[in-house]
């Protein structure tokens, strides 16, 4: 007796066969969390002179000027280079390369 032909497998079910296998659920997230903790850096306290320098730079910047900023985010210092998009006084944020950065988190800002 011959077997009946099977219906073709749908593309979604076929793709499921190739999904990565995760033997321990949550392991990737736990490893990422541990890595973030290991590389966490304490936020530096800026001197009055550094704060005045940052404030003066923001005050004199014009939109679309190229800048490089270093700021504190998620336990690490990030450096971003891009076009200055302005200052939002109500939230005390600046915009660089379409990224909103709280002024309180700035470490340096330089015109390029």
Image (cartoon, grey):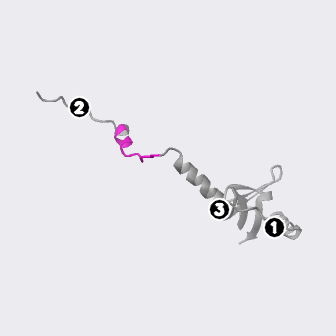
Quick one: SS at disc 3?
Answer: loop
**Residue lying furthest left in this view?**
1
Give neighbour class at mark 2: few <14, some 14-19, many 20+ (Cα, 10 Å): few
Quick one: SS at disc 1?
Answer: helix
Q: CA distance from mark 1 to mark 2?
A: 70 Å
Is 106 covered by the magenta stretch? no
Percent x, y of residue 105:
77, 59
From the image, state whether disc 1 or disc 2 is nearer to you. 2
| Circle nearer the N terminus (3, 1) | 3
User: Given contact means CB atoms under 8 Å apart, are the residues at marks 2 and 3 in contact?
Assistant: no
Which part of the image, by quadrant, shows the N terminus?
top left
Q: Residue at x 38, y 38 (%)?
A: 12
Q: Main secondary structure of the magenta part?
A: loop
User: Given contact means CB atoms under 8 Å apart, are the residues at marks 3 and 1 in contact?
Assistant: no
**Residue lying furthest bottom in this view?**
112
Q: Residue at x 18, y 28 (%)?
A: 4
Q: Residue at x 87, y 67 (%)?
A: 52
Is 20 covered by the magenta stretch? yes
- Read off the residue under disc 2: 6
Percent x, y of residue 85:
72, 58
| Circle nearer the N terminus (2, 3) | 2
Q: Residue at x 44, y 46 (%)?
A: 23
- Read off the residue under disc 1: 57
From the image, state whether disc 2 or disc 3 is nearer to you. 3
Q: CA distance from mark 3 to mark 1?
A: 30 Å
Q: Toward the viewer: 78 or 66? A: 78
- Read off the residue under disc 3: 39
């Amino acid at each position: 007796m011959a077997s009946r032909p099977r219906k073709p497998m749908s593309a979604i079910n076929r793709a499921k066969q190739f999904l990565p296998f995760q033997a321990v659920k949550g392991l990737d997230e736990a490893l990422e969390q541990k890595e973030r903790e290991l590389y966490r850096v304490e936020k530096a306290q800026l001197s009055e002179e550094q704060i005045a320098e940052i404030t003066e730079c923001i005050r004199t910047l014009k939109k679309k000027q190229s800048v490089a900023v270093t700021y504190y985010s998620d336990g690490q210092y990030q450096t971003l280079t891009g076009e200055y998009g302005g200052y939002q006084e109500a939230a005390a944020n600046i915009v660089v390369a379409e990224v909103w950065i709280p002024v309180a988190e700035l470490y340096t800002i330089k015109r390029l």
